[in-house]
Amino acid sequence: MALVQKEIQNNIGIITLDNPKKLNALSSEMVSDIIEALDDFSAQKLPVVILKAAVGAKVWSAGHDVKELPRKMRDPLSYYDSLERLLRAIEKYLGPVIAVVHGSVWGGACDLTMTCDMVIADDTASFAMTPAKMGVPYNLTGVLHFMNRLPLNIAKEMFFTASPLPAKRALEIGIINHLVPETELFDFALNIAKTIMSRSQLSVEVIKEQFRILSKAFPISPADFERVQGLRRKVYDSHDYEEAITAFLEKRPPKFNGK
Ligand code: YXS
């Protein structure tokens, strides 16, 4: 549990991302700790979970740990990738998982907040979807998370610009449920959790599972799936993908050449 703190308050599971030196990057170790906490809360049948960063964190999470992305010739977001395992664990948790956001959210962590059942943020929050900046061919389930949450034009702007959206804009377009003052953020989330806990958990759990199933009920033919996988492979086999990762690690802007 080195990279997250786990606690229970009023029968609510609370997971706190706590690896400030790595800006809470979603490394496989951090992801394993989060999933372990979710499994523990599930075993205790805690009806609601809050996922937050440590108080004062400037960055809620810097997204996928770039140092763990394959340098080339391998799908960076395959089914068993740590980020994908985490997103499925959030979706399959028995009750609502509420993201409580203070600080900036990047890339895979933005997908993580979009996969949580609700997002409550303060005005230090911002949300950036970064595959186009990292040369990453995002995956179908990840794109669908954004399509389910946002108007297409907004989702496309996030993916195509990779620019951070400030909290007020995130509220306007529906990324966040509530924008509250920093000092009230956690208590606001606790109150929503307590309201949910005062309702029928049997009903809440079956409704959450219906949202999960229906939000993924998206028809795509095997031929289209295989074509998308082929297109994605061209990207992660490309100079531009390798250049983006290398440039990030060398702390310089990438030089894309479309090859
Ligand atoms: O120089 P050291 O060794 O101290 O390390 C630096 C950064 O390299 C490191 N760091 C990361 N390490 C691994 N993975 C990351 N995602 C990551 N982000 C940062 O943390 C140390 C401090 O970073 P530094 O000096 O840049 O801090 P800062 O305060 O100047 O800037 C904070 C950020 C968050 C604005 C900056 O670190 C940043 O832009 N980080 C990258 C955010 C990002 O683009 N994440 C997307 C990762 S890729 C991903 O999630 C998906 C694959 S996708 O792109 O497809 O969505």
Image (cartoon, rainbow, N blue to C red):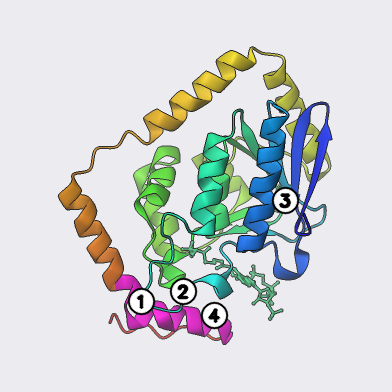
The residue where tag 3 is placed is 102
The stretch drawn in magenta includes residue 244: yes
Helix, strand or loop status at disc 1:
loop
> Would residue 247 appear left or right of 123 to someone viewing this image?
left
Q: Nearer the viewer, mark 3 or mark 1?
A: 1
Element marked by disc 3: loop
Query: Is label 1 in contact with label 2 (beta carbons under 8 Å)?
Result: yes
Give the SS element for disc 2. Answer: loop
**First in sequence: mark 1 or mark 4?**
1
Residue interval drawn in magenta = 235-251
Disc 2 marks a residue whose amino acid type is: Pro
Q: Which part of the image, by quadrant, shows the N terminus?
A: bottom right
* Residue sitting farthest toward the left: 223
Above or below, comparing residue 234 to residue 8 in the picture: below
| SS at mark 4 in the image | helix
Q: Quadrant of the C terminus?
A: bottom left
Image position of 5 with respect to 207: above or below: below
Report x, y in % for residue 175. Answer: 54, 43
- Mark count: 4
Tell me the crowding category of disc 3: few under 14, some 14 to 19, or many 20 or more residues within 10 angstroms, Cα based: many
Question: Is residue 44 inside the magenta stretch?
Answer: no
